[in-house]
Amino acid sequence: MYQYRIYGMCLLSDICFPQLQTISAEEAKLLPQVTVTEAPFPMQFKRDELHFSHIAKDVSYLSNSYCYLLIEQGTRVSYERKGEVSDLLLGAYLLGWGLSMLCHQQGRLAIHGSCVAGPKGALLICGNSGSGKSTVTRELLFRDYTFLADDIAVLHFNDNNTVSASPAFPYQKLCRDAVERLALPPEELIYIDEKKDKFLVPYKGDFPTEPLPVRGLVFLTVTQADTLTINELSGVDKFRTCMNTLFLKPLLGEALYAPENGVLGLRLASQLPVYLVARPANKDSSKEIVSKLLTYTA
């Protein structure tokens, strides 16, 4: 079995994840342990449809074109391959849907976005596809921020009404055009075929091992206006924006605002400032966004 550190846990896996941090047996003993192993998907959950899912506190499951996933008690992820799916593609779904459902069972929030940390704490960078999350994250890293997570940030609510983010692994997802624009060495990249032509790009700075406090959430949108705007949200708009950042939102469907989910969104909205950034379309405004964000979050 392989042993990795991710989201403050020791992940024991029967497949290799080249992007994850390996840890020793001694380090593994100090962390909560979860397992990822291959096992036949229980027949009672199989359906005629290709795609289906169910999310609950004890047993969750998912079926897509590539695999079946079964998540149990916040400690186990089992998978069954469909066809000749590669370990890299399978791993993307295990680390994505699999671990996000596992953290949900643990009472932690999986946020769809990046997480970087500066001197005063971590920032969550969220937004819809194409909103510029990766370029804004990259710009913050150029300004001496530390990388914690990309695509999924896992949050924990503390007893003192603060929120902490646990580090994921030291790789950022970038589209091919961003990789080519930055002239990144191809031998250092891991190609992930997720129908979006993306690469895992290594982060070479110091990568933390302990959770860090979160001081704000940024949600990026694209507008047809000519100028960039940044507004701090409040009330219902703030709550809905927090709910829209949940990684499991597509799977939750109508259950997104069920009490057990809504209460987590309310708690997040009550403990973090949330900033809505509307950037002009067809323009790289990442430097301007970061410069203005740093004045808002100073």
Image: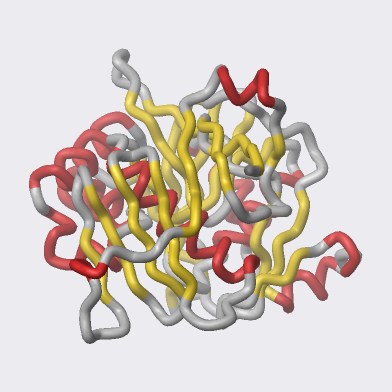
Q: Is residue 221 left or right of residue 101?
A: right
Compared with residue 41, is residue 223 higher up or lower down, i.e. above or below? below
What is the basis of the colouring in this image? secondary structure
Q: How many marks?
A: 0
Q: Where is residue 275 shown, x and y percent of the image? A: 39, 47
Q: Is residue 268 left or right of residue 116?
A: left
Residue 78's image quarter? Answer: bottom left
Q: Residue at x 78, y 70 (%)?
A: 179
Q: Residue at x 64, y 38 (%)?
A: 3
Quarter of the image for the C terminus: give it: top right
In this orientation, which residue lies closer to the viewer: 179 or 234? 179
Q: Is residue 142 left or right of residue 31?
A: right
Q: Residue at x 19, y 50 (%)?
A: 56
Compared with residue 86, is residue 37 higher up or lower down, i.e. above or below? above
Q: Can residue 149 be seen? A: yes
Q: Where is residue 200 shown, x and y percent of the image? A: 70, 61
Compared with residue 278, is residue 215 higher up or lower down, i.e. above or below? above
Q: Is residue 158 left or right of residue 164?
A: left
